[in-house]
Amino acid sequence: MDLEYKEEDLRFREEVRQFFREHLPPELSEKVRTRRRIQREDAVRWHKILAKKGWIAPGWPVKYGGTGWSSMERHIWAEEYALAYAPPTLSFGLNLLAPVLLGFASEEQKQHYLPRIYHAEDWWCQGYSEPGAGSDLASLKTRAEREGDFYIVNGQKTWTTLGQHADWIFCLVRTSTDGAKQTGISFLLIDMKTPGISVRPIITLDETHEVNEVFFDNVKVPVANLIGEENKGWTYAKYLLGHERTGIAAIGNSKRELKVLKRLALRKQVDGAPLLHAPTFAARVADVEIELMALEMTALSLVADGASNKIGPEASLLKVKGTEISQAISELLLEAAGPAGLAFDPEYLAGHKTHAASGDDELAPLAPHYFNLRKITIFGGSNEVQRNVISKMILGL
């Protein structure tokens, strides 16, 4: 089933494709296609190319640099972005912090932080999870005690994605212990160069340094860095998580990966015929493709008529199904690769070698890709928690 596009949508799609053909550096696209690790300088370089075009922040209001695109144009953009194998931008600032700033920050804060996010002057990371506060985020213990015009922050954050690169971190901190645990949380912006902050790497199952622990030891943060009202941070946190969960659905990426899966399954021979033609495997591919189509239709219906600016519990639907589909495709990819997909060559993935030791550059990254995607049903609020949100907020149970 294909969407019906208007003539202006088709013109816009061609404009986007032309832009990628002319401005996406081939070496960056090749890194994404071969699943090799994107470096800090790669992400910043591409981010600045999009910013120069004025296409870095499609979801922002035009007043602050947004594109003014319709929901369909944004859908087309996301799809073509994935199909072009474009590298990620600095999404923690663009897609997570920026909506909070736009919704709750003072105009002075918007004028200061948003342009710096837009032009990749600041790399942001997210300080939410703690060792004792993951899915139960409201149990966080990192304290911010006010002393005059400053907060003194003490505590620890964990699973801080790309914190080793970050200039700033947006943090949930506890500013009060009165009342329910959700009521004493504030949303604070912290310069990572402030004395008392230390970052310790966590090496994940795919041997990647992607996440970190961040420690705060009497870190002095100006009160001016508080977003919104003190003790109202839980409201802002939920707003941010709605945007994060919608993005985690990654529909464009799944459509791209489904194409890769079909190509590999045609290449793989089983009993003298392509694996894609084997009835059981073909049925599993069809199942995931049908689910992806349904997810895409659901997402489009939710963002139609400006609904993308009113993200609510529906984001949990997208997160649950989107992550399940991503994982299912990664499993089928690894199965299509067979034993050759089990080869794991970290030196090749890090860019230290031109070719994988296994001799098959396309299959070499599939195992670490599979391992890495195990996390997506957990971060952004585990899928178990999302089902609770759906049952309570949508179904009224």
Image (tube, helix red, strand yellow):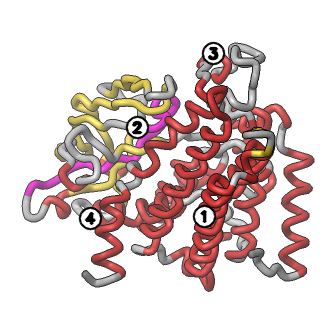
Label 1 – label 2 distance at C-alpha: 34 Å
Residue 160, which numbered label? 2
The reply to whether dot 2 and dot 3 touch (C-beta < 8 Å) is no
The reply to whether dot 1 and dot 2 touch (C-beta < 8 Å) is no
Q: Kindly state the secondary structure of the residue where label 2 is placed.
A: loop
Residue 232, which numbered label? 4
Which residue, given by chain and number where applicable, does mark 1 sit on? 287
**Furthest residue toward front:** 271
Q: Judge whether 253 appears above or below 151 on screen.
A: below
The reply to whether dot 2 and dot 4 touch (C-beta < 8 Å) is no
Say which residue appears at 92% left-offset and 47% top-offset.
22
Which residue, given by chain and number where applicable, does mark 3 sit on? 347
| Amino acid beneath label 2 | Thr
Q: Earlier in the sequence, mark 2 or mark 4?
A: 2
| Amino acid beneath label 4 | Lys
| Amino acid beneath label 1 | Asp
Q: Quadrant of residue 43?
A: top right
